[in-house]
Image (cartoon, helix red, strand yellow):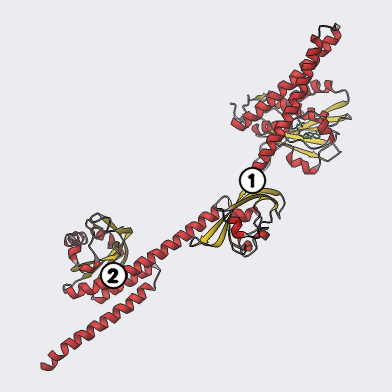
Amino acid sequence: MAEFSMNVPALVATYQLRQREFLLQISRAMTSRLDLPSLLRLILQNAAEIVGCRAGLIALTREHIDIGDMPSTVVHFEARGVYNIDPALLASFAPLLTIDAVPVAADDGGNDSHLPDLQERVRQVEAELGMTLGQVVGLPLLFEEQLLGIIYLFRSDYAFTQADAQLLQGFANQAAIAVRNARLYQQVGRERSRLATIIDNSADGIMILDMDLTVLVINQAMAAMVDVTPESAIGLSYEMVLPLEKVEGDDLNAATDLAGLLSDGGARCEGELQRPGGGRIALAVTYTPLYNGGERLVNIIVNVYDITKFREEEEMKSTFTSIISHELKTPVALIKGYAQTLAREDADWDAETARQSLEIIEEEADRLEALINNLLDVSRIQASGLHLDVDLIDLQRLIERVTEVMGAQSPLHTIELDFPAPLPRVWGDAERLRQVLTNLIGNAIKYSPEGGLIRIGGWSETGSGGKRDRVVIYVADEGIGIPAYELPHIFERFYRVDSSLRRSTAGTGLGLFLSKAIVDAHGGEIWVRSESGAGATFFVALPIADQTPAVSPL
Ligand code: ADP
């Protein structure tokens, strides 16, 4: 008896030492684990085993709840791990996943008194489950006044002692640190992948460079702009990835003092790039410095915008202004000149001269009117598309009528019609289709100044591969033709092929643009075959009229 009583304190001390060692081991294991689900499993299993519990549940708050700011509130938890509980029964534990009062600080012991109505909630769960849970303890996971979660432990045989509670709360404090770390790690990972997704999916080009201008990061848009894969560009020098030419502004590659160049919050430039796969683009580039701790320059963020369209628009505006002013000035000057001459009081014009002058005034006024109508059409197309008055059209008859009028105007040209079989009718807007034909035949005349044969014909063909049956017509001339490299552009707004003839011929570069818009609105197609010096043949295909129109009457 005496021997036993002498050994009790020693036994208790040894037991406590073992417990502390055990706690230390577990907390080391916990803090080195950053994967949240496996950490939660480890915590719950150890918590249950320390005090011999048969089951447990660990639940986390969705966000960190700062109990300093919210002394009393309703807190919702999400069950994140179970120990010896059938997951199918988890719904019955719902009463334990909402608490009305936030538990007070962990140092106070963490027993039931911090979850005031715990017993009541446990009874609700038991009623749901139809069985008793035995002894229940709820351990808040608190870290620097932030409530991160709660561990519930269930023990059937004997009650939790004060010593159990203290041991468990010591464990819970360690577990809270580990949970906090794992959550931060998860958050950093999420932020990183969110940032990577934003960069990667940005429509503008983005690169991150290190201080010797090596590419560290390049997004999809940037890689597509310079015709490389992101993988192949990483590690290359900036100059190799973006060899800008005609640089205006801050040239990063030519900079001798990088820090100085970027010191004013960043730098910018514009330049051109010859893409490896062909084609030239214009780019605007901004360079933003990234400082470490606000002092040392560590990275340069490069943002690249494709301004090719913008530059084209600018060019188009100035082309527009010069073409339109030229095309307006000529007829206005003629009208004014003839009108002034006719009005002279000191001259007595014979009837024939007066008639010829008035005819010229009328023709020039018609030119002005046609130009204004074309411009209105262009702005209509841009604003709301073309309005068509659709009807059944005899295209062949329309061609014959337009040819009669146009042929009479040009004695140098012979117009030949070639329709091996009568053309089927199409759905279309007669006035708009007349405009297309007038433009094509007018161009054939205009761009074969030495005269020659103009052949106009057509046929019908059966559609294949889901395409509708269609009528194809053509206008072929023997004129100056169009160089191959100009062909892709001639249907663009205000586009005129550069030639000495063009410079001496009136035109706005709107005719083919409008013809294409009209044909497109009919559900058709327009294209050209030509060679420089060997004439040009324009083709128009329109769907043949069956029961349903290809375009809906507006
Ligand atoms: P415009 O004739 O008013 O210049 P278009 O849009 O009708 O404008 O034609 C665009 C350009 O295409 C013309 O400037 C001309 O260079 C070229 N083109 C059109 N038709 C022909 C043709 N039949 N032969 C040679 N070049 C043509």
Give the mark nearer the N terminus: 1 vs 2. 2
**CA neighbours of label 1 inside 10 A, class few (<14), some (14 to 19), many (20+):** some
Residue 552: image location, x then y, percent: 59, 29
Kindly indicate the quadrant of the structure image that contains residue 320.
top right
| Spatial CA span between label 1 and label 2 | 58 Å
Taking depth in this image into account, of 250 and 362 the one nearest to the observer is 250
Query: Within 10 Å of the Cα at label 2, are there few (<14), some (14-19), or many (20+) other Cα atoms?
Result: some
Q: Nearer the viewer, residue 124 or 397?
A: 124
* On-image quarter of the C terminus: top right
Ligand 1 quadrant assignment:
top right
Quadrant containing the N terminus in the rendered view: bottom left
Look at the image and tell me whether residue 371 can be seen: yes
Residue closest to the far left:
1
Question: Can you tell which mark lies on residue 111?
Answer: none
Can you identify the residue that label 1 sits on? Answer: 307
- The answer to whether 26 is drawn above or below residue 146 in the figure is below
**Residue extending furthest toward the bottom:** 3
Quadrant of res 342:
top right
- Residue 314 % position (x, y): 67, 38
User: As shown in the figure, which amino acid type bears the numbered disc 2?
Assistant: Asn
Where does label 2 land, which residue? 173
Where 116 falls versus 427 (above or below)? below
